[in-house]
Image (cartoon, rainbow, N blue to C red):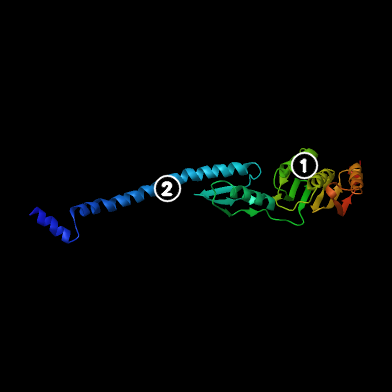
Amino acid sequence: MGQDSILFDCRKGKTPSMHIVKSWFWPGLITIVCLTTLAGWFLAEPMDRQLTETVAAALEADNSWASIEVDGRDLTLKGVAPSEEALASALKIADTTDGIRVVENAATLLPLVDPFSFVVTKSDQGILLSGNVPYGDMRAKLLAAAENAMPGIEILDEMAVARGAPQGFADLANFALQQASQLISGEVRLAGETYSITGTAANAADYEAVTNALKTQLPGNGRVGAVKLAPPSAGNAG
């Protein structure tokens, strides 16, 4: 009877061994797929972290403006680049890093200002620095120079970081701060390399010093624009 039963099953294309295969095949396959997926998740995070650390270290020296996001082997570059050269450099570093497959550029450039302006305004309320300042440590240097030129006077910083500073900007801006210190009140303005000054000199010696300096070649290839400088009043003539 047992043999008949086995033969009967064989005629239907079914054997006890096939029943056994079916009983473990599908649950086993599902388990393998799940474990493979979990392994991918657990391995992806260390890979992301390692690539992020590698690229971040490479960018740190000259491209501190840049930030990155890594998803698997795909990298997205973010941040505001101070120049086209800086952006190209950061993209090259990311693209040539071993393990990175795709680099997406989501970074932007600082606004380009033409003419690049810098304004020193002196009044009873203090000193206002406005206009533009290049990316980097130039802001700190100008603030320090203003404090040295006009100690004890409140300094307000409203400078905006931008591209487009002319060659020699730092020298011309420092010259502007020095001349502003020789005014009772007024404004010194840079528009590109054009230098303009309006206001009232603090005393006769400062009036003469400012006007004489404007007759010579200005620092940073500056050229004289509008000059509306008034001599000191009688009370400040000395």
Mark seen at residue 40: 2
- According to the picture, the residue beneath numbered tag 1 turns out to be 146
Can residue 83 be seen? no
In-front residue for pair 192/101: 101
Q: Earlier in the sequence, mark 1 or mark 2?
A: 2
**Measuring 34% from the left and 49% from the top, which residue is drawn there?**
32
Can residue 139 be seen? yes
Mark seen at residue 119: none
How many numbered marks appear?
A: 2
Residue 209 x %, y %:
90, 44
- Badge 1 amino acid: Ala
Q: Quadrant of the C terminus?
A: top right
Category of crowding for the residue at label 1, using alpha-carbon neighbours closer than 10 angstroms: few (below 14), some (14–19), many (at least 20): many
Foreground label between 1 and 2: 2
> What is the C-alpha distance between the residues marked 1 and 2?
58 Å
**Measuring 77% from the left and 50% from the top, which residue is drawn there?**
119
